[in-house]
Amino acid sequence: MSRFGNIFYLCLLFGALWGAIATILVTLLALFISGELFQPQVTAGAIAGLVTAGVLTGFTPERRTLGICVLSAFIFVLVLTVTSGAEPLGLAMSTYSFGQLIAVVVTAWLVTFAINTTAKGFGPSRERRYNVEVICLRFVKGFGIVAFTIAVALPFFVMVMMSLKNQQMLLSNPLDFSINFEQGFTALFRSYIELFTQYHFGSYLMNSALVSVVTVLITLFFAVPGAYAVARLKFPGQHFLSRSILLIYMVPMIVLVIPLYAIFSQLGMRNTLWGLMLVYPATTIPVALYMLQGYFRGIPAELEEAGLMDGLSRLNVIRKITLPLALPAMASVALYVFMIAWNEFLFAFMFLDNVDLYTLSRGIAELNSSEVPRQHLMAGAVIATVPVLALFLWFERFLVAGLTAGSVKG
């Protein structure tokens, strides 16, 4: 009987897929970085991945040492070079030779790592159906991570690279995202400097920050007691209120803009930031109530009852027991509300006419014009993205640390 089984042949298939995927990704990345017209050799990459998988998974898991992995990566480079006619990236090796060599080595490492991770713990012999399913799930998981990373990172990468270009470079080669660091700091960040000196982006940032922070404070001020009341207290219509909180989202925002525009115009609040500070909480409080009430229901009621038996009032129970336990949920809601207010465009577009009062999203819309260079629009998008990204990364440690905060005494 052959020593090879279903796992081995399945790994051959996944090896070919990983080879094709890695070849496409690395070739496109090399194209963006260098500006050379590289073309992915998909067929050659699939063949090289298949051969690499055959070599690597032909050994038992115990024998897949670092040396075997290096040998498999070398075989991938060799097969890719031969099957592509010595053009692993679609161009002769004499073109950007050092960069092509690095790209091929990176591709080989990625394919070897992906195959080894997919087949980890399984050998070339026939395996049970459960193990075959594990192999398939590993591939699907890895492919999902790669696809999600590309969907998130690629637009941001393009935004950053385009924001560091000048108009001449963008027109001469739109696919060239390489950076010339010899031009100096001022020339490299010219788009960002001009946004703050000529396009009022400093005031846009301050306005957005002010409106977003006030929206978070107002939302939490009303949502926390409201969600606690719905989750803990007994009153007529409690279940109906709990289920109908999100009904406001059934009404499109564009329908609400027209009457609000008329009302705010009559009250003299249309061209003010205070108008946005009233409208935004009206759209964020329902979702905050919905999120917080679910979390409050998850907190054991026995903890609050113990506090009441110890002589604490209902307000002290909420302040000393419930709110410390709810800090992770409150932080998540605050971050979510901040992002909604920071990125909101429709109300800001309709209510604001004064340039000095524009929020960041409203100001970026002004850059989407034929009179404004594309790199300025990309720089504005980067400026709008980075604060929220930094805030999320900073908040993350508090979200994780707050999961157990207040759950034990002492």
Image (tube, rainbow, N blue to C red):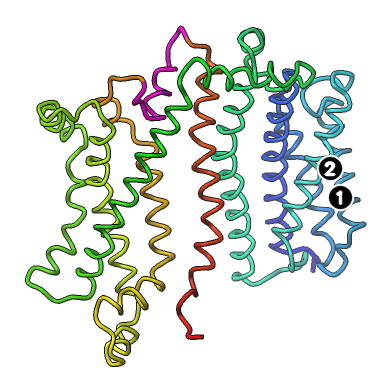
**Over which residues does the magenta segment extend?**
356-371
Horizontally, is 205 left or right of 312 in the view?
right
Disc number at residue 76?
Answer: 2
Tell me what residue is drawn at x 80 percent, y 40 percent.
106
249 in relation to 164, above or below = below
Disc number at residue 35?
Answer: none
Tell me what residue is drawn at x 49 percent, y 75 percent.
404
239 in relation to 153, above or below = below
Q: Main secondary structure of the magenta part?
A: helix
| Callout 2: SS | helix
Residue identifier under label 1: 72
Residue 301 rendering spot, x and y as whole percentages: 30, 83
Tell me what residue is drawn at x 71 percent, y 68 percent.
126
- Residue extending farthest left: 236
Instruction: Check if mark 1's residue and mark 2's residue have beta carbons within 8 Å.
Output: yes
In the image shown, does 43 or 148 lie closer to the viewer? Answer: 148
Residue 388 rendering spot, x and y as whole percentages: 49, 42
Which of the 4 image quadrants contains residue 95? top right
Horizontally, is 283 left or right of 38 in the view?
left
* Residue type highlighted by circle 1: Ser
In the image, residue 358 lies in the stretch drawn in magenta: yes
Horizontally, is 390 left or right of 320 in the view?
right
Which of the 4 image quadrants contains residue 57? bottom right
Horizontally, is 70 left or right of 119 in the view?
right
